[in-house]
Image (cartoon, rainbow, N blue to C red):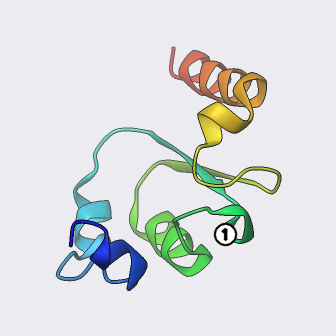
Amino acid sequence: RVLAPIIENRWLEDVSLEEWARQVACPVLLLRGNETLGGMLPKADAESWFRQTHDLTQIDLSNVGHLIHGMDVGTTLRLVTGFLESLR
């Protein structure tokens, strides 16, 4: 039963992504994995977040799925480090 909402693609039921995004007040780095490789964030949802969030940097990674940090450690470290350094 724990995995049923994920399997049935209803894991975000009753969650307003737009409302959540509007409340974010700090810079955000959104790394999005490829849906065909297991990425969990649909492109339409990511685009909605991008429109609603004040300071969001979105990077789509075509070669990884959901476990971005485990599937491509080097790229993840480079992107996160670069983003954090840009905040100085």
Q: Which residue is mark 1?
A: 35
Q: Is residue 7 visible?
A: yes
The residue under the point 41% across, 55% down is: 54
- Residue 10: give x, y in percent of width and height: 32, 83
Considering every residue shown, the one lying at the far right of the view is 63
Q: Residues within 10 Å of mark 1 (few under 14, many from 20)?
A: some
**Quarter of the rendering occupied by the N terminus:** bottom left
- Residue 83: give x, y in percent of width and height: 60, 27
Q: Is residue 11 visible?
A: no
The number of discs equals 1
The residue under the point 31% across, 68% down is: 3
Drawn side of residue 12 relative to residue 1, left or right: right
Q: Is residue 63 above or below residue 42?
A: above
Q: Quadrant of residue 38?
A: bottom right
- Residue 8: give x, y in percent of width and height: 38, 85
The residue under the point 28% across, 50% down is: 24
The residue nearer to you, when weighing 10 against 43, is 10
Q: Secondary structure at mark 1?
A: helix
Q: Is residue 55 above or below residue 11?
A: above
Q: Is residue 36 above or below residue 21?
A: below
- Residue 63: give x, y in percent of width and height: 82, 51
Q: Amino acid at mark 1?
A: Glu
Q: Quadrant of residue 32?
A: bottom right
Q: Is residue 22 above or below residue 79?
A: below
The residue nearer to you, when weighing 7 against 15, is 7
Q: Quadrant of residue 19?
A: bottom left
Considering every residue shown, the one lying at the far left of the view is 14
